[in-house]
Amino acid sequence: MVFSSLVFLYGFFSLSLLAYVLCKTQKAQNIVLLVFSLIFYAWGEPKYVLLLMFMAFASWFCALQVDKAETKRSQRLWVAVAAVIDIGLIGYFKYAGLICSVFGTVPDFIRSIALPIGISFYTFQLLTYVIDVSRGDAPAQKSYWNVLLYAALFHQCIAGPIVRYKTIDRELFSGEPRKPELAAGVSRFCAGLAKKALLANPCGELAETLILSDSVAADVTQLAANVQTLESLPVLGAWLGLIAYALHIYLDFSAYSDMAIGMGKMIGLHYLENFNYPYISRTVTEFWRRWHMSLGTFFRDYVYIPLGGSRCSKLRMVFNTFVVWALTGLWHGASWNFLLWGLWFFLFLMLERFLLKRWLEKLPVISNLYLLAVVLIGWVIFRYSNIQLGGALIKSLFGLNGNALSSFTTEIQLKSHMFLLAVAVIASTPVMKWLRIKLEAYACGSDTMIKIWDMVFYAVIPVILLLLSTACLVGDSYNPFIYFQF
Amino acid sequence: MSEMNPKSESKHTPGWELSVPFFLVLAVLTVVSFIIPLRPTQSYTEKRNLAEFPEFSLEALVSGDYFDDITLWFSDTFPGRESWISFSSNLESLHGYSEIAISGVIMENDAIPVATEAPTVPPTAPADTAVGTEATQPTEPEPTETEATEPEPTEWGGIDAGEFDLTPGAVIQVGDSLFNSLGFSQYVSDRYIRIINGFAEIMAPKGVNVISAPPPTAIGIMIEGEYLDQLNCARQNEIINYLHSGMSDDVITVDTYSAIVPHNSEYIYFRTDHHWTALGAYYSYRAICETLGYTPAELSDFEEWDQGEFLGSLAGQASRPNAVRRDNVYAYIPQGDITCIINDDYGNVFEGDLLADMTQRDVNTKYLTFLSGDDPMTQVTNHDLPDAPNCLVIKDSFGNCFVPFLSQNYHNVYAVDYRKYVAMNMQQFCEIYDIDDVIIMPYLIATQSIQGNNLLSYQFGVYY
């Protein structure tokens, strides 16, 4: 189940809220959250709900043993056990095919392994829990069901943010009454929903029209035709498709985080931000401080720093960074292009550190363009698991396929999506946030004004966004081309 | 990397009561979505049955299909879906501005080879057939007063879900009109030619005329060639020339493109539907009669019947729905003592309406007036012409508005829908029903589709 589906909005979400508010005690509320979270997960992965439960069990058990251990050595042993189980399982379900392909053919039984939804997110959450307990950063949770709730909580279980146990331990399990921020949560949730339904989806459709849909690009039998399609794209079409894709991927992913944060606020759980307008960055270093921040901090705290971080020799630091970015790439998918994508950023991070940083700091607009170029080319690598397709598109971007600069149909596509793209670009920058803060500060000057502001921003706009998003989601089910249409 | 910095929100804390409207709307729509009778089961605009609630099975539950199907059912049958969709279409029209807009992907297509035999060169579209609203101005016939009668139940115009998978391609909006794109495939065209030649070769010794008259589609008639090139769509006169130049002397070819294109300032194609209008079909009928040496009936011999406002199959795919102008369906009632026997999908045989009264029916269904919709076989008999020849029409729904005209020249017209008919192949059919002329008229998109060719190959008993 995805947040931006009608069955979630008007089935699951409403019923879970209703059940939640009917509960008086925090314990009962947690039971409701757990039951609904398991239903949510089972809805997408009926089989693998058992895997999730087992991994939570292993982490719960290991963390208790870590807590009880009297020596550092036995603590490390139990952390290692948890890590072997978690990494072993994610390795089996996610990377077995890739690993086998290194050694030759991939056996059929490996090929048939389906990737459990959200495994990359909840595995990392459970790992951070055990490690944080061993470091004394978080207390060991006595109740298995509470660890399961932490890992399975439907707000963030399948698409992040990666929430650390210590971040929500107090709010989730302390027994103190939670402090819901209903209006702020609703506003954030609706903003995310609208970002997804009104902006991300149509940007994605435009990208698919121009630079191949995922399913078409993944069809190896169509490789030659796909390469030809990308090679014959006019330069304008290639850029349009790539920019639409870049907007889609940011708006889509950050919309999920917005909705998760909004739902959390509604019941008094506060998750940390996951995106901070990454496309306005001026360096790759800054981009990764603003993009999928919860993943970045995970790799920083649990890989980079334990390896020695930057407080070591230059060569060692380069190696540490290399490891982090190879893993970051592979975390996104078990395919070589993801590894390449991670290393693409590694390359520029090193270039910036040793060479470009000083220059980029002095050149505001040029540094913005540099960052966008690096990220956009990065998205080409990210999008196509076949390097031929990525190569064809990159060449088309610069007219190196002998492709035309523009075409009649591309100009039509541009004209018929120009307002959408403009709004999507604005939504990817802090303009609206800046405007909101300014208006709110202005409104705070008088009681009447602040009432009007609150009414508009927290009551009217969320309802409008909910209704507009609903219309778009119903519209998505419109599918007249499935059938023979004489 | 720096620690995550919570965004610098202002200190102002809005009160919980501000969230009440949101929760109210959420609650109302939740309640509405669980009132099952409010959920539609069919979509007239999409010509399909909507998703059904899945049957439970342990296998489906474990595989995840059960929940996936519930998710699909929930959104596909959401109460008020047509209104929501119409609203979201209007929202989409705000995405940009362009006189021409494309929805979907226009596929690459083959270059059309120059015909080997010198084909008759059809006139090019008149210069005033410019891209824009002018291209599709209909003539405004005087509305005819008709009495409202009890509506007859009618079947879908389309075919069962899942049986075939032909995607006609992108929908292109030009001004107030919508068009299906159409490309050319040399491989499929060559196969089509072989199938028709094969059938004609078998029928020729039996004295049966085989006539090829594929209806062009709107885009080929209403849009000028140079725009078609830019839109990566094939010129349909060239497709028809290619098909016909490959056909043997056993096939009588009718240049439907040249017959229709001079009339493209008239209302010969719908703006919101992929079909031609009955007027468009009439010009094709004239051309066929003239080729076969029959005297075509004049349009004034028919009584015009206004079925009312019509919103066709392409309406929901308009990129700018506000700009789309609605259609009207006009049927032409033929003279004479004419009966219409329908063989339906379930094997029932009954007397139906040659032209059904759809005046009081849903705005999306008006095209079903012609032959009362698509059925595997419909027999139209003109009892005033007992000595006239018999004709078999191999058709899809384009043929529905065309067949009534033939009643003026044939004793029996057997309209076989090649997508649906399964009782016998057309060689046997001709023998059993004493057929003199076979008019083959799959619309041009079907001639360029593998599925369309598979069906025709099956119907003719000619396998390539």
Image (cartoon, coloured by chain):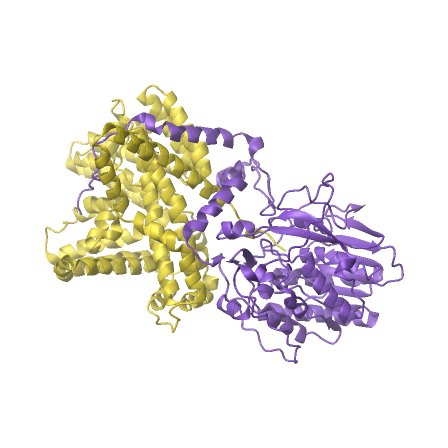
Chain colours: A yellow, B purple
Q: Residue furthest right?
A: B387
| Of the pair A81 and B259, the residue shown nearer to us | B259
Question: In the image, what residue occupies the spot 40% across and 24% down?
Answer: A19
Question: In the image, what residue occupies the spot 36% across and 35% down?
Answer: A462
Tell me: B147 left or right of A244.
right
Tell me: A394 left or right of A208.
left
| Of the pair A315 and B157, the residue shown nearer to us | B157
| Of the pair B22 and B65, the residue shown nearer to us | B22
Residue B39 is at least partly visible in this image = yes
Question: In the image, what residue occupies the spot 61% across and 45% down?
Answer: B44
- The x, y position of residue A337, in whole percent, is 33, 59
- The x, y position of residue A94, in whole percent, is 36, 49
Tell me: A73 left or right of A384.
left
Tell me: A400 left or right of A1.
left
Residue A55 is at least partly visible in this image = no
- The x, y position of residue B71, in whole percent, is 49, 39
- Quarter of the figure with residue A12: top left
- The x, y position of residue A264, in whole percent, is 31, 33
Question: In the image, what residue occupies the spot 50% across and 63% down?
Answer: B107
Quarter occupied by the N terminus of chain A:
top left
- Quarter of the figure with residue A87: top left
